[in-house]
Image: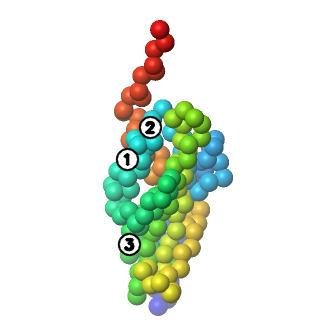
Amino acid sequence: MRRLFAATAALLVCCLPLGCGTPPKGAGAGRYAAVEIDGFSRVAVDLAVQQVCERHAYTKVSQKNDSFTYEKAGSTGQNILWGNLERGVWERIVIKVTRLTEADHFLVTLDAYRIHDHGDSLLEESKKMGPAMQSKYQAMVEEIKKLLEPIPPPPEPSSK
């Protein structure tokens, strides 16, 4: 038991500094993970969100207006770290796409939760992910923006 505790403590000490990242800037300041996307339609942004989530093995659970909810089973390391080896821990992310201006300018935000007792209508409990995991999710929203970059924005209508 002591060896397991020592191994877990060593893992935490080694890995926690890796989780620190640059917090979102601009309109996303103060958010867990956020990025601004400019010059693309709402449909293109929504498709990019879906593709990135699928690349990371998330399954869409629900979609309501501007909010998408995705889930996936937690890894063995997450189950050991968060202490739920019997039922397993799940990751849930909620991504919101908010129009900032009348033009095609959007803010994509992501909130992440760990879910204990997933699927149990009485015992399911969600806890917001801490700052040690923030860089993982910030990289994910930045990947959404990068996925759109190779696509040229639509041409401006010419005035004659």
Q: Percent from the top left, x then y, of residue 1?
A: 47, 91
Numbered label attached to residue 73? 3
Q: CA distance from mark 2 to mark 3?
A: 32 Å
**Residue identified by numbered label 1:** 47
Residue drawn 57% across and 69% down?
A: 128
Earlier-in-chain disc, 1 versus 2: 2
| Quadrant housing residue 55 | bottom left
Indicate the amino acid at tag 2.
Answer: Ser
Find residue 68 and name its label. none
Horizontal side of 146 relative to 110 (left or right) equals left
The residue located at (41%, 27%) in the rendering is 154
Residue at the far top in the pictured view: 160
Indicate the secondary structure of the residue bearing disc 1.
helix
Q: Is residue 141 above or below residue 111?
A: above
Q: Is residue 50 above or below residue 3?
A: above
Q: Residues within 10 Å of mark 3 (few under 14, many from 20)?
A: some
Q: Amino acid at mark 1?
A: Leu
Q: Are marks 2 and 3 in contact (CB under 8 Å)?
A: no
Q: Residues within 10 Å of mark 1 (few under 14, many from 20)?
A: some
Residue at (42% x, 80% y) in the render? 119
**Disc 3 from disc 1: Cα separation:** 23 Å
At which x and y percent is residue 101? Answer: 60, 36
Residue pictured at 52% horizontal, 64% vertical: 112
- Which residue is denoted by mark 2 in the rendering? 41
